[in-house]
Amino acid sequence: MIDTLPLTGFRLRLRSGEPLAPRTTWRIGGPARFFAEVDDVAALAALLGWARAERLPAIPLGKGSNVLVPDEGLDAVVFALSGELAEVSIETPLVRAGGGASLMSLAVTARNAGLSGTERLSGIPSSVGGAVRINAGAYGIEIFDLLEEVTVVSRVGEIRVVPAGTIPHGYRWSALCEGDDVVAAARLRLRPAGREEIDASLAEVREKRKKALPVKPNAGSVFKNPPGDHAGRLLEACGLKGLRVGGAEVSERHANVIVNSGGATAADVRQLMARMRDAVRDRFGVDLLPEVEDLGRFVTNRGDHRSVESPR
Ligand SMILES: Cc1cc2nc3c(=O)[nH]c(=O)nc-3n(C[C@H](O)[C@H](O)[C@H](O)COP(=O)(O)OP(=O)(O)OC[C@H]3O[C@@H](n4cnc5c(N)ncnc54)[C@H](O)[C@@H]3O)c2cc1C
C-alpha cells in the first residue's frame, strides 16, 4: 500500500499502524492507520493533498499533551512536523519557530540569543503549532501576546502567512480551532534581555510547575476555567479528588487533572470526565467545557469530508 503512494520524493516518512499512545502524554489510545513525519512545507502540502484525495482525515499531532486518542485508533493520516518544520531560528528581536518545535526549545534558543518573553510558556509540554491553535498560556501570558504572524497550510495545500492580529483568539481558543489549517510556523516578537534575568525566570517557572502538577501521565487541565472561576476549585469542592473509572483517576494534587494510574483507556477518561462535569453542573449549575481534545470526535467531524465533493 505504502509503495503505491504518490508521495515519493517528498521529505516525509510514512508508516502504517503506528501506535499513538506513546506519542501522547496520557499514554492512551490505539494506532493510526497512517502516520507520517513531515520535514518541510512542500511535503506537508503533498501529504494533505493525498489525504484529501483518499478522503482520509489528516490530523496534526504536536506533543500529544492535549489530546485523547480513541482506544480503537484513528482511521486517518496522523502526522507530526519535524525537520525544518521543527526548527527555531533567530531574527532579533523576532524568533521564527516551526510548528513542530517544542515551547522549551523555543525558550532555550531565545534565551541563548538574549531574547526574553517565552519563559512563562516554557514549561508547557507543547509544540508551537499546538500552542498557537489553542492559544496556550501560563502565569498571565498567552502565546498570542507574542505572536507576529503565523504560516498556515490549508487542506488543499495553500500556504498563507497570516498576521496574528487578524486571527480571532481568546482564552484557550483561536479561530484556528474551527478549521483544518495546519500551523507550519510562527514568528514571535521578543524583548532583548540579559541571560541572568532570563535564566532566573526560567528557573522560577520550573519550580512552580514541579510543585503544581502530578507525575503520573496526564494531559494537564481537562476542563477550561469557566468565566471568573477555576474548574479545579469547583471540582475539588465536589470532593472529586481520587475518583476513579478504570485506570483513570482525578489527581489528588489537582482536581482538574486526570491521571493515567495504569492501563487507563480513552473510554475510562470519557466516563470520568462525564462524571466530573455532571457533579459540577448538579452542585454549582456550571457547565464545564473540555480543554482536552477528543480526537475520536474530531475524526467523526472530519469524517464528514467523506461525503463532501470538495472539502476545503
Ligand atoms: C503536564 C501538562 C501541563 C500543561 N500545562 C498547560 C498550561 O500551563 N497552559 C496551557 O495552555 N496548556 C497546558 N497544557 C495543555 C497542552 O500542553 C496545551 O494545550 C498544548 O498547547 C497542546 O499542544 P500539543 O503540541 O501537545 O498539541 P497536541 O496535544 O498534539 O494537539 C492538540 C490539538 O492541536 C492540533 N494540532 C497540533 N499541532 C498542530 C499544528 N501544527 N497545526 C494545527 N493544529 C495542530 C491537534 O490536531 C489537536 O487537535 C498542559 C498539558 C500537560 C500534559
Image: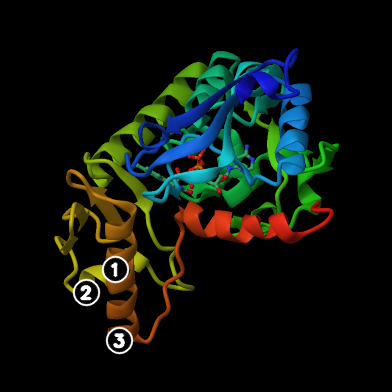
Percent x, y for residue 86? 61, 22
- Mark drawn on residue 129: none
What's the residue type where badge 1 is placed?
Arg
256 horizontally vs 190: left or right? left
Question: x%, y% of residue 53?
Answer: 77, 41
- Three-letter amino acid code at disc 2? Ala
Dot 2: what SS? helix
Residue 27 visible in the current orientation? yes
- Residue 295's place in the image compared with 76, above or below, is below
In this view, the residue in front, 309 or 280, is: 309
Q: Hey, what amino acid is under mark 3? A: Asp
Q: Name which residue lies at 60% across and 57% down.
A: 173
Mark 2–mark 1 Cα distance, whole angstroms, equals: 6 Å
Residue 9 as seen in the image, left or right of residue 213: right
* Alpha-carbon span between mark 2 and mark 3: 12 Å
User: Could you tell me which secondary element the residue under label 3 belongs to?
Assistant: helix
Within 10 Å of disc 3 (Cα), the crowding (few <14, some 14-19, many 20+) is few
Q: Earlier in the sequence, mark 3 or mark 1?
A: 1
Q: Nearer the viewer, residue 290 or 18?
A: 18
Tell me the residue that label 2 is attached to.
237
Q: Is residue 235 above or below residue 153?
A: below
Q: Is residue 36 left or right of residue 289?
A: right
**Which residue does the image show at 17% across and 43% down from the upper left?**
262
Quarter of the figure with the N terminus = top right
How far apart, in angstroms, are the residues tagged by discs 3 and 1?
15 Å
Percent coordinates x, y for residue 42 in the rendering: 79, 23
Q: Determine the image quadrant of residue 306.
A: bottom right
Q: Helix, strand or loop at disc 1?
A: helix
The residue identified by callout 1 is 233
Q: Are marks 2 and 1 in contact (CB under 8 Å)?
A: yes
- Please tell me whether mark 2 or mark 3 is closer to you in this view: 3
The numbered mark at residue 282 is: 3
